[in-house]
């Protein structure tokens, strides 16, 4: 019996490398010269999922400002309806600092609920 097939992708939850926190924070998304208010649905040191009234395509470069956490640059990696997923572009050092800021922010109980899975 074959235990693992190399042509079968791993389930998404197995690919996550950072804890994801659910939130409803209001942030700013800057893309294609437009600065809009957005709602951050969840965030991790690796990226974020948000809602914003802006038309983007996968691959667009963006900047995201999240109150209490900071300003990150990233790339749109997925679009699902009105949801935009962004993967952050950062060095390992910056990712580690971001992970610390996110963990500290959510440890204070600033927002309702977190998710224990990783992203």
Image: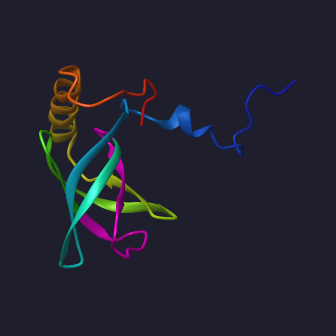
Residue 47 x %, y %: 33, 47
What residue is drawn where x is 37% and y is 29%?
Answer: 19
Residue 32 x %, y %: 24, 78
Report the span colored magenta.
43-62
Q: State yes or no: residue 117 in magenta.
A: no
Q: How many marks?
A: 0
Residue 2 position (above or below residue 73): above
Report the front residue among 95 and 35: 35
What residue is drawn where x is 62% and y is 37%?
Answer: 11
Q: State yes or no: residue 53 in magenta.
A: yes
Classify residue 7 as left or right of residue 49.
Answer: right
User: Which colour scheme appears in the figure?
Assistant: rainbow
Residue 106 position (above or below residue 37): above
Residue 83 x %, y %: 44, 59
Which image quarter: residue 23? top left
What residue is drawn where x is 20% and y is 45%?
Answer: 91
- Which quadrant would the N terminus be assigned to in this image? top right
What residue is drawn where x is 22% and y is 39%?
Answer: 95
Which image quarter: residue 94? top left
Which image quarter: residue 21? top left
Residue 6 x %, y %: 69, 40
- Which quadrant would the C terminus be assigned to in this image? top left
């Amino acid at each position: 019996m074959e235990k693992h097939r190399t042509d079968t992708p791993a389930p998404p939850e197995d690919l996550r490398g950072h804890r994801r926190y659910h939130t409803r924070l209001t942030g700013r998304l800057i893309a294609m010269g437009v600065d809009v208010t957005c709602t951050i649905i969840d965030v991790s040191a690796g990226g974020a999922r948000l809602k914003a009234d802006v038309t983007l395509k996968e691959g667009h470069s963006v900047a995201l400002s999240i109150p209490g956490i900071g300003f990150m640059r990233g790339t749109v990696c997925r679009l699902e309806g009105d949801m935009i997923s962004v993967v952050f572009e950062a060095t390992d050092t910056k990712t580690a600092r971001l992970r610390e800021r996110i963990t500290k922010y959510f440890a204070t109980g600033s927002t309702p609920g977190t998710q224990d899975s990783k992203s």
